[in-house]
Image (spheres, grey):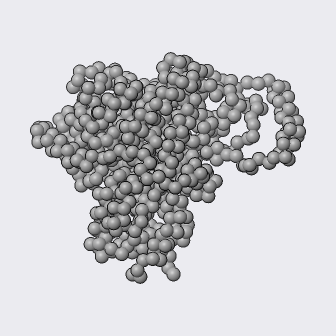
Amino acid sequence: MPPIRVLIAKVGLDGHDRGAKVVARGLRDAGMDVVYTGLHRTPEEVVAAAVQEDVDVLGISLLSGAHMTLIPRVLELLRAADAGDMLLVIGGVIPDEDVPALLALGAADVVLQDTPPDAIARRVRELVAARQPR
Amino acid sequence: MFDPEAIERIRAKQRAWEARELREFLARQPESRADCRTGSGLPVERVYTPADIAATSFDEIGLPGRYPFTRGPYPTMYRGRLWTMRQIAGYGTGSDTNQRFRYLIEQGQTGLSVDFDMPTLMGYDSDDPRSLGEVGREGVAVDTLDDVEALFDGIDLEHISVSMTINPTAWILLAMYVALAQARGNDLGRLSGTCQTDILKEYIAQKEWIFPIRPSLRLVRDMIVYCADHLARYNPINISGYHISEAGATSVQEVAFTMANAIAYVEEVTRAGVDVDRFAPRLAFYFVAQADFFEEVAKFRAARRIWAKLMKERFAAARPESMRLRFHCQTAALTLTKAQPMNNIVRTALQALSAVLGGAQSLHTNGLDEAYAIPSELAMKLALRTQQIIADETRVPNVVDPLGGSYYVEALTNRVEAEVGEILKKVDALGGTVKAIEEGFFQREIADSAFEFARRKASGAEPVIGVNKFVEPPEPNAVPVHKVDPEVEARQIGHLRAVRAKRDGTRVAALLDRLAREAADPGVNLMPVTIELVKARASLGEIVGRLRQVWGRYVETPVF
């Protein structure tokens, strides 16, 4: 089986990249192919990169509180790019009450604070395994 | 400090103790940890004696208010004046945050601190497409001078010090602050406060940037020089370790990288021909109070001593005020957990106590809801009460540097100083701070420390109560969370458009042209033209946008 391909992205003006980088490194150490976008990307840039890299999982980190504006836009763009089957995993500071809404919009999972890197790697594997073959 | 014969006698006693009491005790009951280390990973001994600081002369420890300032910047410290209790606040529009300021002042807060929203920090107007969803969310939205007027409405700027947490756009906010004070007829020489302005740590840690490094440094220089000429009591920069720590650095790295940045600023300003003693007394610092109690106290003491020596030896400063490090402190947001949020009150109280024992000049204590959202009013009140309890009930402020002379704290202070010295040598060898940033040196070191910490936390080697130890099922709605007003964005954009509609557009355009011309000449100070611009109601986004055309933007090569 080829390694799982992941794009870790920071979207919006939020500069908190500690978590995104720890997760990127944790997934790489777990044997996945990981690309990191760097900071301050627009939803358009992130989706274009995810499509170009043909990743299985798009991981978006947000600590700015702008997730309810930016995530729906990302999902809309993924569908428009015919990449609606790409798994979108969200991390960062996300209030519990927003989690069901994000899942209903089409996010595959929301990984909350203090989830260890190993647990995130396990979760990514489960999500990819459960996905319909592409 | 000690007589060599006395040290020999102490060593002999310790050897005897190790051979008898310690050996017998360990045989019956082994220690639970084989290897004890500080939060920065420095090894610590079981017990400390004068032998551990035998080589330290009393002059290294000294007296407060005297070189090398290990014990504090002032002779009387909190007996003269308590630290400033400065809770940061910012959300919504200027008038929304103004209400929170008035509430905090009513609750006994003694200084103000402003948090700005992401678009303001990054130089975008509220109606810019990149601002969508971020207006007034993580801080207050500021587009024009009108917003700053609303922010400080009814607050006397000559009688309360104001700190502004802003970096790439700091010079514009300083210009607005000056313009507001002038419009009110205030004496600029009486304004006290601080602008964060520390752009170098942005490239390293907090990651809020606009322009490439060199023109950004020039803006810092312009602010420092302008304040030296016009705002005698204002700190034009707060050289910050806090964000370096929050991004993952150890406490030793925090101090070292902060000092590396400070060196770069002093070089930048002296290169422009300004005498070091003209501006160095107003350089201020900002550190975190992390979880390792004694290491933090030692860190603050070491930082003061390192700075004093740097200023005296490296920069040949002559005035004691130039060598005297003053710092703001904030407890460590990253140690606060979403699980069992009430535990955060206890963590914050302990961290705040280390800041006070370490001699902080001002302090922000974090809200218990830090891991949820920006703080609620209740969370901020409790955080402020924590400081008030330390100040009024513990009697800790009675004695200056009460941990000075502790064999452990003195040994650790020496060790932190030595470790920082090694890192600074490495930075010099790399060609200096800017070069080291361009090569990603600090960024890689921080990413490595952050990853190492995440691994230790995951394995349980780094216990976090409620997260990897004494875990309980999550409680829904554990704390009341600050709600964002969904109408803020529309209201703020409405204000901005109204300001644009009534200003003199020709004058703004002419001033923006002047700004572009002056920006192209690195010798010109950009503060005067920026003050003219904000008075003419140019917006923050327009000023930044014009400079982006001249200087371009910073592009990071991300490392992980």
Given residues B136 and B327, the one toward you in this image is B136
Quarter of the image for residue B17 reads: top right
Which quarter of the figure has residue B112? top left
Residue A21, given in percent of the width and then of the height, sits at 48, 58
Q: Is residue B521 visible?
A: no
Residue occupying the point 48% across, 69% down? A124
Residue B166 is situated, as x and y percent measured from the top left of the image, at: 36, 40
State which quadrant residue B448 falls in.
bottom right
Horizontal relation, residue A3 to residue B181: left or right? right
- Where is residue B149 drawn, in percent x and y? 23, 32
Q: Residue at x 50, y 17 (%)?
A: B80
Q: Residue at x 18, y 37 (%)?
A: B537
Estimate the x, y position of residue B85 in percent, counting from the top left.
Answer: 44, 29
The N terminus of chain B: image quadrant: top right
| Rendered residue at 75%/37% (across/down) | B47
Tell me: residue B185, above or below residue B305: above
Q: Nearer the viewer, residue B507 or B109?
A: B109
Query: Would you say B118 lies left or right of B479 here?
Result: left
Note whether residue B90 is visible. Answer: yes
